[in-house]
Image (cartoon, helix red, strand yellow):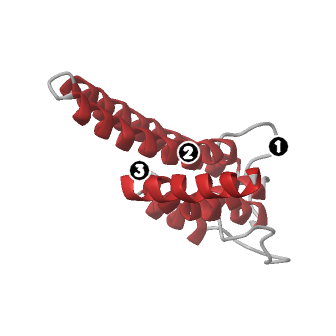
């Protein structure tokens, strides 16, 4: 539904002049900059819908973590560690994804959507690190990494 709102906004816009987007991908704010119409109201609509969706997502995440943490009281210490390890990995990925999006979509003066570095971060860097972050939860992987690091340190000491 959120994407449909963006598509419906862009379809109705008149475009003229240069049709090159100075961005890594076709995002809504660079498209609104290319329009030959007053887009201030559309920017407010995009910010409002994106903000509402972000707030609802955040509330859903907080509620899920409250439920997880409340059920942890009834589990063993091994279960606590396993659940907290999963939660820690998930929270890391969520923060790595949502923080750059906040800086991209929250208006700060005239810099709406200008920063391509943030867009690059949440479209490329986070997906690259996501498997690594979840792999570090694996006990076999942790043991293999310790073994490699310990061998390197022993080699340096000789």
* Residue 148 drawn above or below residue 106: below
- The x and y percentages for residue 130 are 50, 58
Closer to viewer: mark 3 or mark 1? 3
Left or right, 114 with reference to 78: right
- Residue 110, labelled with which disc? 1
Image marks 3 and 1: residues in contact by CB distance under 8 Å: no
Q: In this view, does 153 lie to the left or right of 61?
A: right
Residue 45 in sight here? no
**Front position among marks 1 and 2:** 2
x then y, percent, for residue 121: 67, 56
**Which circle marks residue 97 in the picture?**
none
Going from the N terminus, do you reach mark 3 or mark 2 first?
Answer: 2
Which residue corresponds to mark 3?
137
Q: Which residue lies furthest to the right in this view?
A: 17
Label 1: state its secondary structure: loop
In the rendered image, the quadrant that contains the N terminus is: bottom left
Disc number lying in front (3 or 2): 3
């Amino acid at each position: 539904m959120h994407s449909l709102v963006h598509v419906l906004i862009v379809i109705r816009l008149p475009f003229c002049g240069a049709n090159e987007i100075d961005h890594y991908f076709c995002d809504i704010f660079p498209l609104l900059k290319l329009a030959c119409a007053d887009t201030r109201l559309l920017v407010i609509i995009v910010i409002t819908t994106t903000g509402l969706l972000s707030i609802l997502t955040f509330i859903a995440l907080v509620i899920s973590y409250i439920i997880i943490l409340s059920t942890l009281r009834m589990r063993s210490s091994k279960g606590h560690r396993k659940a907290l390890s999963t939660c820690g990995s998930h929270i890391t990925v969520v923060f790595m994804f949502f923080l750059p999006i906040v800086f991209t979509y929250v208006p700060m003066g005239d810099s709406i959507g200008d920063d391509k570095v943030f867009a690059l971060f949440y479209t490329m860097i986070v997906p690259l690190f996501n498997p690594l972050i979840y792999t570090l939860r694996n006990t076999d992987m942790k043991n293999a990494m310790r073994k490699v690091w310990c061998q390197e340190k022993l080699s340096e000491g000789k």
